[in-house]
Image (cartoon, rainbow, N blue to C red):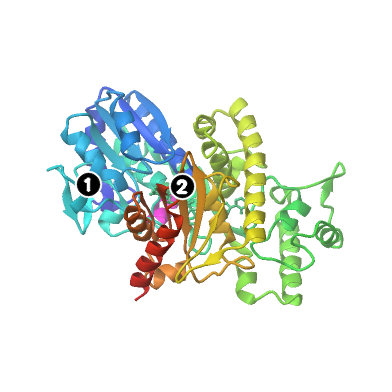
Amino acid sequence: MSTSGPVPALADRATASADRLRAADRVLLASHIDADGLTSAAIATTALSRAGIPVETVFKKQLDPTEIASIAAREYETVLFTDFGSGQLDVISDHVAAGDFEAVVADHHQPSAPADCNADAVVDTDGYADFDYHCNPLLVGLDGASELSGAGAAYVLARALEPDDGDNRDLAALAVVGAVGDMQAVGGELVGANEGIVEEGIAADVLEEGTDLSLYGKQTRPLPKLLEYATEVPIPGISNDQAGATKFLEDLGLDLKRHGEWRTWADLSDDERQTVASALVQRAVTRGVPADKIQSLVGTTYTLTTEPTGTELRDASEFSTLLNATARYERADVGLAVCLGDRQAPLEQARKLLANHRRNLSEGLDLVKERGVTRSEQVQYFDAGTAIRETIVGIVAGMALGTDGVDSDRPIIAFADADGETKVSSRATGPLVGRGVDLSVVMREAAQAVGGDGGGHDIAAGATIPAGEEDAFVEAADDVVARQLD
Ligand code: C5P
Ligand code: C5P
Ligand code: C5P
Ligand code: ZN
């Protein structure tokens, strides 16, 4: 086995996939509508273009037999799937066997079960359906929820596609945005294969890794807003308290305004940051915030050094939220343009979409708080109906886990209306996964039991089921979770 490339275990698969793509006259690229899917697509299209291979890109909410048939109808000889495809390998391989297209898949989701596949070309790799051109961390013993994202898999492929060694390392920055967007950072830090990609980005001068305040909005939020909205670690008298946050800053005796406007964290000197951070920790200590929470106030941050200071694009976390704000609202074209470096109209438009996205997330969380969740034997769930968009209900569910009234030690399931069907999203925690919970299996089996289908990761997964089957779905999910915890 070759040991080259950023993820040696995937090198042979990446080489085979790259060779297959080079043999194509043109490629249709299909990718997923979130931050990871967008960055996957940006990485893959850039690498294909640099290799002189024409590419057209389409985005899909979720791959299902209908969507795959619509891709086949485009009559491209070669289709590259990024950030999805593994979970639908059964359907994709049928199309390949029928001669509809040749497929290459760079993904990190749980692959289909081999038993579901009819095509001869599908083989069994440790209980996962597998075929010739398949780059997925799970096939080589890496964790697809924390060690490599879809963008990471696309990056491995991009490095195998590059004309000269090292050319595509600049794309590591986008791979990090994808991984952070999929919440792959463990305790704030990227680990495993992701770490290798971070190192390549640093070597290519596109990325910096640092230790800093772990609050969201360091690049763009005025300081009082940064602190007021920082509710991941609630600090009494500051979080959710505009006047308190402002007074806390005023009392520090620093010059934190410029031309009458509050500065941002990104704009502070190292000394100023040190002063604010120490005072914040001090306040948390005196107000009795638990030590582990205080520790999580500081974490690893990933800075895109080629992006302008004070923009969303400079910080991997803010960049990924900006991208989610486009793709999850049917404007993947805007997010892709931003990823590809188009910084005028698309960036303006993305910022408008971001304001809307943040409002929706905040209203969604309020709704869960007001209505509460229902507890079944093993899980807790809520039905958002049409009140939360199906494309963001999973984000809201994840953010709700562990807030007041929502247990942090049982999986959460959310339902939302989706064009006459029901979208299901589910989220778990590290400890639950450690005890055996695998939501990708829960979603797939419970959905199939009621005439739908699903999949994803152990810690976060989703499904689509027929409307009206929600109660039966919860019952089936309870059974699977009980079996997993047994
Ligand atoms: O489709 P995809 O893989 O891109 O989506 C991953 C989803 O899983 C994201 O919405 C992310 O927030 C969620 N996730 C999570 N906790 C983790 C890892 C992923 O909620 N530890
Ligand atoms: O689930 P996914 O990875 O797509 O969600 C993006 C993440 O961005 C959220 O889970 C949350 O941690 C973060 N976020 C936030 N505040 C917001 C919006 C997003 O902290 N208002
Ligand atoms: O949509 P949501 O954010 O809840 O998705 C969580 C994870 O489950 C994502 O990685 C998504 O790609 C995956 N998923 C899936 N099949 C579905 C729905 C979601 O693999 N039908
Ligand atoms: Zn992904």
Contact check, label 2 and label 1, Cβ < 8 Å: no
- Write down the quadrant of residue 372 in the picture: bottom right
> What is the secondary structure assignment of the residue under circle 2?
strand
Residue 397 in view: yes
Residue 103 sits in quarter: top left
In the image: residue 103, left or right of residue 311? left
Residue shown at the point (76%, 68%) measured from the top left: 236
Residue at disc 1, secondary structure = helix
Q: Which residues are magenta?
A: 193-200
* Residue that carries the numbered disc 1 in the rendered image: 12
Residue at 65% in and 70% down: 294
Residue 280 is tagged as none
Q: CA distance from mark 2 to mark 1?
A: 40 Å
Q: Is residue 8 magenta?
A: no
Residue labelled with disc 2: 422
Q: Nearer the viewer, residue 258 or 419?
A: 419
Query: Within the magenta stretch, is there residue 195?
Result: yes
Mark 2 residue type: Thr
